Amino acid sequence: MQQNLKRIAGGNWVISQIHRWTLYKTVIERMLAHGSSAWCLNPTFKMKRKLSSIQRPFLLHISGAYRTTPTAALQTILGIPPLHMQLQFEARFTSIYRLRIPLPPFITDTQPHDLEMKATGWSTHPSEYLKPNQISFEDGEAYIAREDINIFTDGSKIDHGVGATFCVLTNDIWAYQWSAKLNDNNTVFQAELTALHEAVIYASHLPNHNTSKIHIDNRASIMESSNSKSTNETARKIFKILLSNPRIKVSWVKAHAGNIGNERADQLAKDATQHGQPYSHTKLPKPHIKGLLRKRMLEEWQTSWKNGDTGIKIYTIMPSVSLRPTNLIREDVIFFSQHGPFPSYLKRFHMSDSDYCSCGGIGTALHYATECIYTVSWHMRKTAPNFEQE
């Protein structure tokens, strides 16, 4: 695969490093990950070695480093995890999210039934749909009548937690309000849908002769709830309630525009993040479990990088791993790894009989950057002594 790409795109793929990195992450890695959930949940040592040998040529071509540069150093520089860890991360996610198989407690305590799943198909028969006047995406503030039952909903997420609320205004009187504190790992969108769901339940229990207007400042929630093919279970429940109660209308209202009902709902939602009634019916979102598993992968990668016996020179300047690539260009990688056209390197790999520079000093990368009399105009301040350690 790597050789075919090399023949097509040239020795360095004739594109910038960031584009090579993107090509690897979006194409190459996706191809290698195909079916990994079936064989990479618990990779053996032999599998890890094999996957490392597959990944290494791509790392060299992305970075432009010398072939002797340690794989672990290249992975850290480029922000690309060891291939077996990346595939194991995806296998774990597939196991718990798609196959509904629990993972060992040392990985995560989250159970499959705690996760929000995508619904499929139609929520009702295709011939059933909401009335045209039930949903409005235009600013509904101008249509708020004081004698109607006006329900304002909102969701909020801050550092302290996630809250959802709705409040009822009729004849200039606040008739009712509901607030709940969701799990801290729930999203704002989930909070918005939860508030809307509780609001339509409340409205559906009101006398049939009353017209209820629900005002929400999140268009995405309205769009999701009015779609009979929505993949969100909460949105599907809202759709069914609206379908059986055509007197309930949902309208968008502009946020933070001085609307008294929207402003009150916004404040109640923020208060609910700390003081709301605990609400456990909203399950954890897909990004939550992905975040947990990704964090676990980074911890394992960090341990491997810290305890590894290669790439020590790079470790001194990059002790922590990250999924973001560094800004090091090819020349930087060669300099910091000290795997390049230096006498000390050439002798180490039996390509030269001497490791001395023409000036008489040991020809290391640091020597040329700080001491060599022939490169004075490029000298920089010498780094800490521990950088020179093997």
Image (cartoon, rainbow, N blue to C red):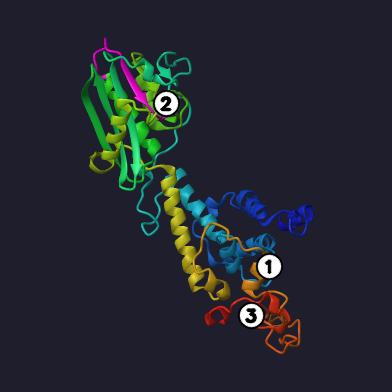
Q: Which residue is mark 1?
A: 331
Question: Dividing the picture into quarters, in which one does residue 71 lie?
Answer: bottom right
Crowdedness near tag 1: few (<14), some (14–19) or many (≥20) residues, C-alpha within 10 Å: few
Spatial CA distance of label 3 from label 2 is 64 Å
From the viewer's side, name the closer residue of 129 and 40.
Answer: 129
Q: Provide residue 256's location: percent of width, then percent of height.
A: 37, 31
**Relative to 121, does residue 308 appear above or below in the rendering?**
below
Spatial CA distance of label 1 from label 2 is 53 Å
Marks 1,3: beta carbons within 8 A = no
Residue depicted at x 25% and y 23%: 168
Q: Provide residue 162's location: percent of width, then percent of height.
A: 32, 42
Q: Which residue is mark 2?
A: 222
**Relative to 158, does residue 238 appear above or below in the rendering?**
above
The residue type indicated by label 1 comes to Glu
222 relative to 362 in the view: left or right: left
From the viewer's side, name the closer residue of 363 and 119.
Answer: 363
Q: Nearer the viewer, mark 3 or mark 2?
A: 3
Q: Is residue 310 visible?
A: no
Please state the extent of the stretch shown in magenta in the rendering: 205-218
Q: Residue furthest top?
A: 209
Residue depicted at x 61% and y 66%: 74
Q: Provide residue 279's location: percent of width, then percent of height.
A: 27, 38
Q: Nearer the viewer, mark 1 or mark 2?
A: 1
The residue type indicated by label 3 comes to Thr
The prevailing secondary structure element of the residues shown in magenta is loop
Crowdedness near tag 3: few (<14), some (14–19) or many (≥20) residues, C-alpha within 10 Å: some
**Relative to 210, does residue 7 appear above or below in the rendering?**
below
Marks 1,2: beta carbons within 8 A = no
Q: Which residue is mark 3?
A: 370
Label 1 sits on a secondary structure element that is: helix
